[in-house]
Image (cartoon, rainbow, N blue to C red):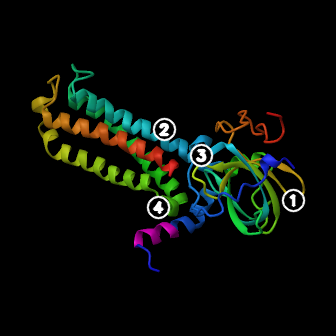
Amino acid sequence: MNTKHRVLPLVFATLLSSVPAYAHHSFAAEFDGNKPTRLVGKITRVEWTNPHSYFYVDIVDAKGHSQNWGCEGAGPGALSRRGWKKGNLKLGDTIVVDGYRAKDGSHLIDARRVTFPDGRSVYGGSPGDGGPGDNGTDQGALPGTKKS
Amino acid sequence: MTQPLIQHVCQILYDSPIGTAIRESDNAFSVIESVHVLSITLLVGTIAILDLRMLGLILREIRVSRIARAVLPLTWAGFLFMLTSGFLLFWAEAAKNYLNPAFRVKMVLLLLVGLNPLIFHTTVYRRVTQWEIDHRSPWRARAAACASLLLWGGVIVAGRAIAYF
């Protein structure tokens, strides 16, 4: 596993987790392309909503503490076209989410790639949002798929 | 904990089957958004024609009432579509919108921008036959025109800003 993509929880562990912004916006409005993050955890909540979807995972940080993180993805229409249907993810499923942290330091990442329990990966970003690897398609250049 | 009545109503709308269906839809939400934007262009575009005429910037040779008659049906059409599509979007996101500062600013601006034509039409526009051929309308009409352009601009900016909170 690429260490660059490990969770970066220690520094931020003491920060208050804040409410994710419920909004429609470009990547740069909310996320930091210099903070790639990988979350591995169990799903605790799914919001299959326009204009962006949100799902939440419980992860365990390096100190063994459990933390709940929010992941923001594209809207239902875009995700459905890529083969991710409502109800695909069940509470308690373990998923891997690669993305980038929110600029405000909250426990929120922009989900650029979501790997399901069956190993299938779906591009979770919004095409054309200007985020890292965005190539304007439903696939994007998924994090970790090319050397930078 | 008690919550304000408006917030309670917003939550009921948000949780309702229709609100949820729009919020979780594959396509409906973005279609409604597009209708909302298009109807705003119709509404504010036609209003701006009348405002700019009264400010003496365009169509100076044409009577104000002639322009008003021409644009008003389009303005109303834009208004109805805007209101309907806007309400559907609100229905889908009501509980989130309630807490959104930009949405609150937008609602206040909408109230003000609605008062403006009420005042205008019950005062200076009643005497439109006395000034409608003037290249530049009286100051009360120009003030209403400026208020209209500024407030509608503010509504659009605040509306766009909802997404960033």
The residue at the point 28 percent across, 40 percent down is B148
Numbered tag placed on residue B118 in the rendering: none
Q: CA distance from mark 2 to mark 4?
A: 26 Å
Chain for disc number 2: B
Crowdedness near tag 1: few (<14), some (14–19) or many (≥20) residues, C-alpha within 10 Å: few
Verify whether residue B98 appears in magenta. Answer: no
- Say which quadrant the C terminus of chain A sits in: top right
For residue A46, say whether it is visible: no
Please determine if labels 3 and 1 lie on a single subunit: no
Numbered tag placed on residue A117 in the rendering: 1
On the rendered structure, is A27 left or right of B131? right
* In the image, residue A144 above or below residue B99: above
Q: CA distance from mark 2 to mark 3?
A: 12 Å
Is there a contact, CB below 8 Å, between mark 4 and mark 1? no
Report the amino acid beneath label 2. Answer: Leu
Residue indicated by mark 2: B38
Report the amino acid beneath label 1. Answer: Pro
